Amino acid sequence: MKSHRMIRIVIAILMIMTLPACFNDRDWRTASRASAGIAPDPKITEEAILHVYGARAWGWRGWFAIHTWIAAKKSGEPSYTVYDVVGWREHRGLPVLHIRKDIPDRHWYGERPKLIREMRGPGVDQVIDAINEAVADYPWKHEYKAFPGPNSNTFTAWIGNRVPAIELDLPFTAIGSGYSN
């Protein structure tokens, strides 16, 4: 009996200590969206580049999950195309699949991205073409569910499965990456 009570006390103390960390005073509207300085400058880099990034998810989800996205620049292009799935676009009546010319290695609302996969040089233009074809066929362009998916990691994994040349191996924290398998 005493051991059960002690366990409950320890759990209560841990909850009291960790619960405030679930709430922070950060505001997504003012969180950094600046470049992390990982991607080569497309204006001076002639070769084709493909990057897959991951950064801790916003808020409490970042404790255990990341958000992933793909950035690509074909040979000679002066900018990157960024492909990702963003759940809050659904609430605005927009497709969750978002494709745009953008900074490839932006902080994900204050979280520094990590490079998960890089491909450069000869043959990458063809891989980017295959990615564009796979993106056109992505089946959940208007659907998002944090768990179990489809979400940003479902998208990145789905592209990786459709374009095996990427040889993509997402980390365990890419929650939702197994949704499409």
Image: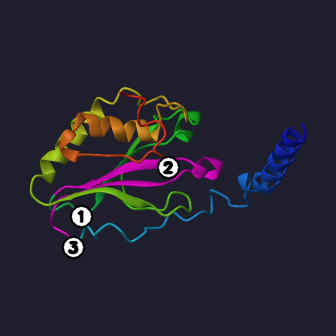
* Front position among marks 3 and 2: 2
From the top left corner, tell me how far across and down residue 128 is, in percent: 20, 47
Height in image: 95 above or below 63? Answer: above
- Residue located 51% across and 32% down the image: 144
Question: Disc 1 or disc 3, which is closer to the eye?
Answer: 3
Sequence order check, earlier mark of 3 and 2:
3
Mark 2: few/some/many CA within 10 Å (<14, 14-19, 20+): many
* Residue 96 or residue 9, whichever sits in front: 9
The quarter of the rendered structure image containing the C terminus is top left
Three-letter residue code for mark 2: Ile
Image quadrant holding the N terminus, namely top right
**Residue 156 position in % (x across, y down):** 36, 41
**Span shown in magenta:** 45-74
- For the residues marked 1 and 3, what is the alpha-carbon distance in whole angstroms? 8 Å
Element on which disc 3 rests:
loop
Residue at screen point 45% across, 34% down = 95
- In front of the other: 125 or 57: 57
Q: Which residue is mark 3?
A: 44
Magenta stretch: residue 69 in it? yes
Quarter of the image for residue 28 reads: bottom right
Query: Circle 1 sits on which residue?
Result: 78
Label 2, on which residue? 66
Q: Residue at x 30, y 38 (%)?
A: 159
Per the image, label 1 sits on a secondary structure element best described as loop
Residue at image coords 82%, 49%:
10
Q: Could you tell me how far apart the alpha carbons at marks 3 and 2 are, in whole angstroms?
A: 30 Å
Give left or right: position of 39 versus 130.
Answer: right
